[in-house]
Image (cartoon, rainbow, N blue to C red):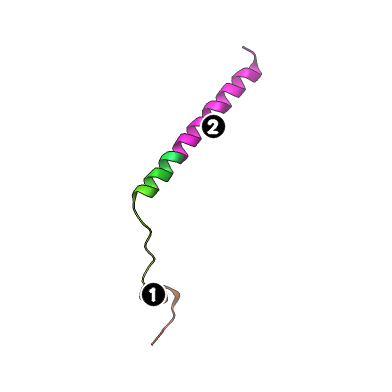
Amino acid sequence: MDRSKIVAIITGAISLLLAIAYLLLVQLLDFRGEMVPAPISSLTYVLGINIL
């Protein structure tokens, strides 16, 4: 095999590994459940806003 074929195979393998890792990460994050926003009182405390 010449050098260009080896580089192409290695690049394709890296691409497949990154794609599979991305899909696993998305599935893991999706498995955590629905995203719930923070309560307004917590948000105002973090921003330093005093709402009375």
Residue 43's place in the image compared with 31, above or below, is below
Q: Residue at x 61, y 23 (%)?
A: 8
Task: Classify residue 46 by image quadrant.
Answer: bottom left
What's the distance in space between the residues labelled 1 and 2, CA to CA?
A: 42 Å
Q: Which residues are magenta?
A: 1-22
The disc labelled 2 sits on which kind of residue?
Ser
Alpha-carbon neighbours of circle 2 within 10 Å: few (<14), some, or many (≥20)?
Answer: few
Expressed as whole percent of the image width and height from the top left, the position of residue 15 reads 54, 32
Seen from the viewer's position, the closer of residues 7 and 34 is: 34
Badge 1: residue crowd in 10 Å (few <14, some 14–19, many ≥20): few
Q: Secondary structure at mark 1?
A: helix
Q: Is residue 14 magenta?
A: yes
Residue ID for mark 1: 40
Which quadrant does the N terminus fall into?
A: top right
The answer to the question of whether label 1 and label 2 lie on touching residues, with beta carbons closer than 8 A, is no
Q: What secondary structure is marked by label 2?
A: helix
Q: Name the side, left or right, on which 19 lies relative to 40.
A: right
Nearer to me, 22 or 10:
22
Q: Main secondary structure of the magenta part?
A: helix
Q: Please, which residue is most extreme toward the front here?
A: 34
**Which residue reaches farthest bottom?**
52
**Residue 11 vertical position relative to residue 31 in the rendered view, above or below:** above
Q: Please tell me whether residue 15 belongs to the stretch shown in magenta.
A: yes
Q: Position of residue 33 (x, y in %)?
A: 34, 53
| Residue named by callout 2 | 15
